[in-house]
Amino acid sequence: MKFTERTIEEIMERINKVENFIAKKGLGSQYLDKAHRVQRNVNLALVAVGTLTIAGLVALAIRRNS
């Protein structure tokens, strides 16, 4: 069992290395980098909007109770 598990792990590591190499140097790698940046910016914007919404709701609730 250990031999097959070890073999599978090594094969998966090599596949991941090849996939990462293709992602960095292959066709469309620039578009992939751009997509990662866009996704990061969208995530940051969603976090900011969510934080502001929660802060606004808290402020509204405090103001109504006063």
Image (cartoon, rainbow, N blue to C red):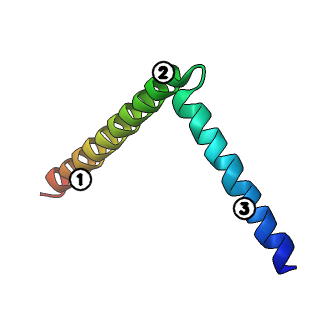
Up-down relation of residue 24 to residue 64 (above or below) = above
Type of residue at label 3? Glu
User: Disc 2 vs disc 1: which is toward the camera?
Assistant: 2
Q: Do the residues labelled 1 and 3 touch (CB within 8 Å)?
A: no
Q: Earlier in the sequence, mark 2 or mark 3?
A: 3
Q: Which of marks 2 and 1 is nearer the N terminus?
A: 2
**What residue is rendered at 23% in x and 44% in y?**
56
Residue on which the image places disc 3: 10
Q: Do the residues labelled 2 and 3 touch (CB within 8 Å)?
A: no
* Label 2: element kind: helix
The CA span between labels 2 and 1 is 42 Å
* Label 3: element kind: helix
**What residue is rendered at 29% in x and 40% in y?**
48
The CA span between labels 2 and 3 is 29 Å
User: Disc 2 vs disc 3: which is toward the camera?
Assistant: 3
Type of residue at label 2? Gln
Percent of width and height locating residue 50: 34, 43
Q: State the quadrant of the N terminus.
A: bottom right
> Is 62 or 27 nearer to us in this picture?
27
Quarter occupied by residue 4 = bottom right
Rate crowding at label 1 as few (under 14), some (14 to 19) or many (20 or more) other CA atoms within 10 Å: few
Percent of width and height locating residue 44: 34, 39
Rate crowding at label 3 as few (under 14), some (14 to 19) or many (20 or more) other CA atoms within 10 Å: few
User: Disc 1 vs disc 3: which is toward the camera?
Assistant: 3
Residue on which the image places disc 1: 58
Give the residue at the far bottom of this rendering: 2
Residue on which the image places disc 2: 30
Type of residue at label 1? Val
Q: Earlier in the sequence, mark 1 or mark 3?
A: 3
Percent of width and height locating residue 39: 45, 32
Q: State the quadrant of the C terminus.
A: bottom left
> Is 8 or 66 nearer to us in this picture?
8
